[in-house]
Image: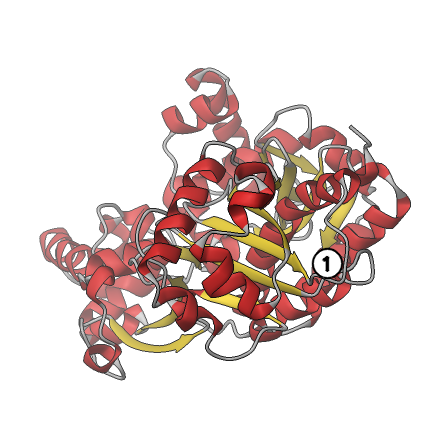
Amino acid sequence: MFVVHKSEGFKQLVQDTYQLAHDVSEPMFKQGVLDRLTQTMTLDTAFWMTRSEVDTPYAAEETYTYHLPEGVQENYLKHPTVLQQALELNQVLMANLGTTIDVKDIIPQAQWHKSDMYLLHCKKYDIEHSVMTLYPSDHNQMIASISLNRHARHPAFTPQERELIQAFVPHMVEAQRLNTLYHFQRHQTAHTLRGVIDKHGKVIESDAGFDEALADIHIDLANLNLSDIQFNDLDSRYICQGYRQSGYIHLTIQQKSPWEILSQRKVEVAHLLVQGKPNKTIANELDMSVETVNEHMADIFKRLRVRSRYEAIAVLSGGSHNRAQPPLLFDRDHTLLYCDKTAAAILDKQQILLDSVVEKADQGQPFFALNGILFQCDKTETFIRISLADYSESLSVLSARELVIAYLIGNLLSNNEIAEQLEISVKTVENQLTSIYRKLKLRNRSELVAQLNGAV
């Protein structure tokens, strides 16, 4: 191996790719990445497809084509023998996921030049040299298929170039994911959930809560007809809109405010509920019986589709700011690949060094806290992803361990679930919770959930 991916040129290529994820719109992202790659090596044309099904027939709209004329995919799809050879190539690539392979290493050159795929398709568009990579996302069920091509006047891809491409493809896939997520964040509004869905009905990327909303609405994603949902109120809590772009469906689910679906009397009960007050106190303040409060509470749970007061408090108070955002990405060598401006400002304000964050994340802890900042980590073979949430002002009196436990309670985990997540005893969780109540001057879990979600 030549280890070209350790070079300064490769590192700059990767950094520029993640900068593109932040700077350009979704429709322009793939072109921007391939334009940048041409500064590193000769590249004439390319196909870049992201899909969840690899054994089903391809569709033209699924593939981004680079420097190729209109109709190239239609030409490819209209020849059954070409499609069959493509599926055979795909089987070899599936057996070697993540490996960049020259087509002529699969099919000998003499045989390749006599094949229908070459004669009816590749030769027509001067695709003489082609290297292909299938790469599965470690974050969702999508597989990227990327083919990079050269014309006949150029030499074949060298082993060093193939190694560089193989090292670069995971970053192409991850940067595309971040580009989608950043698009969500730039257009984020209250009570709005967004998702990107492929032609097979698989959700590629989505806001937290999107899958739950889909389950409530009972939309058949595999047979989604946009005319059926555009601007229609499919559920008492949701309004959906959708549009197609680059072979995907972009679906927006507008959640009605939970307060809009409650009667005036139930709103009065709910206002006291989100302050963490027990039913007896609510009954006294509203001059009604505890039995009546219980009935109102049961109906509130039913309308909000929740099972506990903690869930109801989180729904009624929004709960969105209690979720960590995903702004930090490192490779396994601890090189920073992506950090948005909000995260950088938070870390700078709290004087937290990136080195200390990634070193702690690499130790395998899924959650930890530094200087009032909660970090959530996801470590894979290729990346270390770190999300963060700022509690430096609202929960500054808590210790690092207490902050982690409070955060998990705010996300509605039980004591047993917290103990399992943090690999500590339930008794330790209970003791920490007692300390949290004392420091924050709270009486119970409901009040803690309410405070974490900004209701009190």
Q: Residue at x 71, y 55 (%)?
A: 343
> Does 87 sit left or right of 99 as displayed?
left
Answer yes or no: is residue 266 visible: yes
**Other-residue count near label 1 (Cα within 10 Å), few / some / many at <14 / 14–19 / ≥20:** many
> Does 19 sit left or right of 132 as displayed?
right
Q: Residue at x 76, y 30 (%)?
A: 359
Estimate the x, y position of residue 81 in percent, counting from the top left: 34, 55
Which is nearer the eye, 203 or 407?
Answer: 203
| Number of marks drawn | 1
Q: Secondary structure at mark 1?
A: helix
Whether 170 is drawn above or below 150: the answer is: above
Whether 71 is drawn above or below 282: the answer is: below
Q: Residue at x 65, y 70 (%)?
A: 31
Q: Quadrant of residue 16?
A: bottom right
Estimate the x, y position of residue 357 in percent, counting from the top left: 74, 37
Q: Residue at x 47, y 26 (%)?
A: 421
Estimate the x, y position of residue 141 in percent, counting from the top left: 41, 45
Residue located beneath label 1 in the image? 17
Whether 26 is drawn above or below 206: the answer is: below
> Does 390 sit left or right of 164 as displayed?
left
Estimate the x, y position of residue 337 in percent, counting from the top left: 74, 49
Which is nearer the eye, 326 or 64?
Answer: 64
Whether 88 is drawn above or below 83: the answer is: above
- Amino acid found under the numbered disc labelled 1: Thr
> Does 245 sit left or right of 222 as displayed?
right
Which is nearer the eye, 413 or 21?
Answer: 21
